[in-house]
Amino acid sequence: MPQPDLPAHHILQQAAQWFATMLDEDVRQQDRDQWQAWLNAHPEHQRAWHYVEQVGQRFQQAQQQAGTTGARQIIHDTRSSRITRRTLLGSGLASVATWLIWSQTTLPGTARQLAHTLSADYRTATGEQRQLTLSDGGQLWLNTATAVDISYTDTIRHIKLRDGEILIETAKDALARPFVVTTLQGSLRALGTRFSVQQRDANTQISVYEGAVEINATTGQRLTLQAGEQTSFTASAIAKPHKAQHSRVAWQQGLIVADNISLQELVEELSRYRHGYLAVDASVANLKVMGTYPIDKPDHTLTMLENALPIRTRRVLPWWVTLEPDH
Amino acid sequence: METLYNENHGWLQNWLNRRVGCPALAADLAQDTFVRLLANPRPLNNLSAARSYLRTVAGRLCIDLWRRQSVEQAWLEVLAARPEALNISPEEHTIIVETFCEIDEMLHRLPEKIAKTFVLSQIDGLTYKQIAAQLNVSERTIKSYMAKAMLECMLIEARFHHSVS
């Protein structure tokens, strides 16, 4: 490729060589002097050195903008997606594997720091939802008012559910690290899977949609929950599993699906997405409700309910709404 | 140019659509390909020469696009992994994506060990000794890797520099 403005190739080579020498931690004063002499010898040398500086700056920028871990991750992800594409086009797989292994292998000294940076708090506010892609390619959805800590280390993929509800689709891990979710009542080990976990006041609710999940309650009870099952557990007891309702994860699509549930249950569900206090008069609490309601418009949902059922909303205070019989 | 466009636009768009799997994107890329050709006209005497040239330009655009997308995706993930919310302007975002696209361009030509060496030095700030220990090669080898990597990067940097100015 002809590049008339570029210094001659051998000068660029010299500059690159000097760069490698000057960066060496064992560089001698004698080398420094020689480098300075080389630099002063010719304007073309200075021009070549200018490119060395620009490359250095480019990497420095990358490191400052994304942080060491972030920059490494971006560089690695971009390279491996490039390699994956090439692989799809018919070349070898070996290079992907080695690059991936490198990206996961850390120096003993930096391992702790890396684990620390990757361990971060994620939160959603009431009514907010969020989807995250985990570093292994797995997906994590945070429902309303949810807080999790994510910590990926050399030996484990760990999600700590502090509050709220998550839906997880695990990805196959190159390092075969176990995928574990812990709640206040115990831990769940995913066995290749899609499942949702909700931290409730007194227990943990879990539904498995694909694969299986092994439940370990804090005091030692164990149970493997299969796809299509749901249950709840406390620190000491795991309830008998029953059929999982797919409507339970409609929140991932921003919907609440009421499949013949009581108004009381729907309101409890709705309250999770809405600030303020929502109450149901006992005389209408057991009315059956069917339908699909948007999560992001809880007040619209209340109007829909008023139209569908013999109820009306009474706003005691702006943030306090009671559903009562309409007569 | 008009004949070239009329004869090849549909064909190119189909070809692109097979590669990117999205008609709207394929249409955009086909348009970009012709814009490139307009900006940089060259004699294309027959249909097969024209198509081979269009394929090359369009193929390069696809690769740029894929790279940009994977860089962008990776950057968004890094952002999402941060506990604190950052205010990043669209301009800053573009600059960051640009920076990493260029770095990818620099590194992807290098053999893997050399690329690793350069990243460990320039991003992680490791010394030659530390890199040598991690990659299980001599410090001398690391030093020669660094020189090779820098030379490749300089050539790419120069190309970017000239295409921008």
Image (cartoon, rainbow, N blue to C red):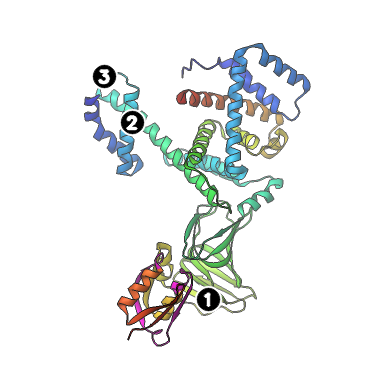
Asked which secondary structure carries label 3, the reply is loop
Q: Read off the residue under disc 2.
A: B33
Q: Read off the residue under disc 1.
A: A232
Kindly identify the residue that appears in the image at 48 percent across and 46 percent down: B73
N-terminal of the pair, mark 2 or mark 3, is 2
Q: In this rendered view, identify the residue nearer to me: A301 or B65.
A: A301
Label 3 CA crowd tier, 10 Å (few <14, some 14–19, many 20+): few
Kindly identify the residue that appears in the image at 62 percent across and 37 percent down: B123
Label 1 CA crowd tier, 10 Å (few <14, some 14–19, many 20+): many
**Cβ atoms at labels 1 and 3 below 8 Å apart:** no
Q: Point out the frontmost of discs 2 and 3.
A: 2
Give the distance between the C-alpha atoms of the residues marked 1 and 2, in whole angstroms.
58 Å
Q: Position of residue B127 (x, y in %)?
A: 71, 35
- Whether labels 2 and 3 share one chain: yes
Q: Read off the residue under disc 3.
A: B45
**Quarter residue A99 falls in:** top right
